[in-house]
């Protein structure tokens, strides 16, 4: 039948291929070469559309933060990550922070944005996270999951338990809104499996 432009890209490729197979014997070599040259650009574009339709949106590092202790942390463009965490970052209380399995604190900037839209005076870095990630389905972020963050590979180890220091970021002081027991909105700790440098804009994906 005739080419149907309303079909999905992959289906159009199949249809065009079937039509070409039926008619190829009717073309002389010179005409075939000319036809293939004319078809190459639209076929390549269709193939690109088909591939892109199957690809998930890319998650990226949207913010990096460190401090000399306490919150909020200060935004920086790039950080060096060692096995014990972000070089130059320090926690005010070492009783509950700073162990190797707490080397990094990660959070979703999408979650923070949702809190802000709900009227809470919170922004990335407020709650002590080192790495802010945009575009990752945060319901997939749970202990045991491995992430590739720029050059760094890390394993999520535990949910970060919210404390009263974060009450100021919520209009009613209910910092338990960040708790994993309430929703998928929790920050997470991670150990560093492979150190390196992370910069804002680096890609983030679930590691094998």
Image (cartoon, rainbow, N blue to C red):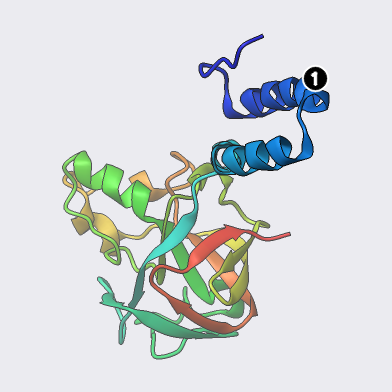
Residue that appears at 83% across and 25% down: 25
The quarter in which the C terminus is drawn is bottom right
- The percent position of residue 173, horizontal first and vertical second, equals 21, 49
In this figure, what is the number of numbered marks? 1
> Where is residue 87, by image quadrant?
bottom left
Decide if residue 172 is on the left or right side of residue 164.
left
**Along the viewing direction, whichever of 81 and 121 lies nearer the viewer:** 81
162 in relation to 18, above or below: below
- The percent position of residue 125, horizontal first and vertical second, equals 30, 67
Check the image and name the residue furthest to the bottom.
88
Q: Which residue is mark 1?
A: 22
Specify whether residue 176 is in view: no
> Where is residue 115, by image quadrant?
top left
124 in relation to 16, above or below: below
Decide if residue 151 is on the left or right side of residue 30.
left
Specify whether residue 61 is in view: yes
Decide if residue 93 is on the left or right side of residue 2.
left
- The percent position of residue 168, horizontal first and vertical second, equals 19, 57
59 in relation to 12, above or below: below
Check the image and name the residue furthest to the right.
25
**Along the viewing direction, whichever of 67 and 22 lies nearer the viewer:** 22
Residue that appears at 60% across and 36% down: 50
Residue that appears at 56% across and 79% down: 99
**Along the viewing direction, whichever of 174 and 39 lies nearer the viewer:** 39
Residue that appears at 58% across and 39% down: 38
- The percent position of residue 152, horizontal first and vertical second, equals 58, 76
The quarter in which the N terminus is drawn is top right
70 in relation to 124, above or below: below
């Amino acid at each position: 039948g005739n080419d149907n432009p309303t079909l999905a890209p992959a289906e159009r490729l199949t249809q065009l291929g079937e039509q070409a197979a039926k008619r190829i014997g009717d073309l002389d070599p010179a005409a075939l070469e000319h036809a293939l040259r004319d078809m190459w650009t639209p076929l390549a574009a269709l193939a690109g559309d088909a591939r892109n339709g199957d690809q998930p949106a890319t998650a990226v590092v949207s913010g990096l933060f460190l401090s000399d202790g306490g919150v909020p942390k200060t935004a920086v463009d790039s950080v060096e990550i060692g096995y014990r965490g972000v070089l130059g970052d320090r926690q005010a209380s070492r009783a509950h922070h700073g162990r190797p399995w707490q080397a990094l604190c990660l959070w979703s900037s999408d979650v923070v944005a949702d809190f802000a839209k709900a009227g809470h005076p919170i922004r990335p870095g407020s709650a002590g996270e080192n790495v802010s990630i945009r575009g990752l389905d945060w319901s997939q972020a749970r202990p045991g999951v491995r992430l590739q963050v720029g050059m760094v590979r890390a394993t999520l180890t535990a949910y970060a338990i919210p404390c009263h220091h974060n009450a100021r970021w919520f209009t009613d002081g209910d910092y338990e809104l960040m708790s994993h027991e309430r929703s998928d909105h929790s920050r997470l700790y991670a150990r560093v499996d492979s150190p390196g440098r992370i910069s804002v804009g680096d890609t983030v994906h679930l590691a094998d």
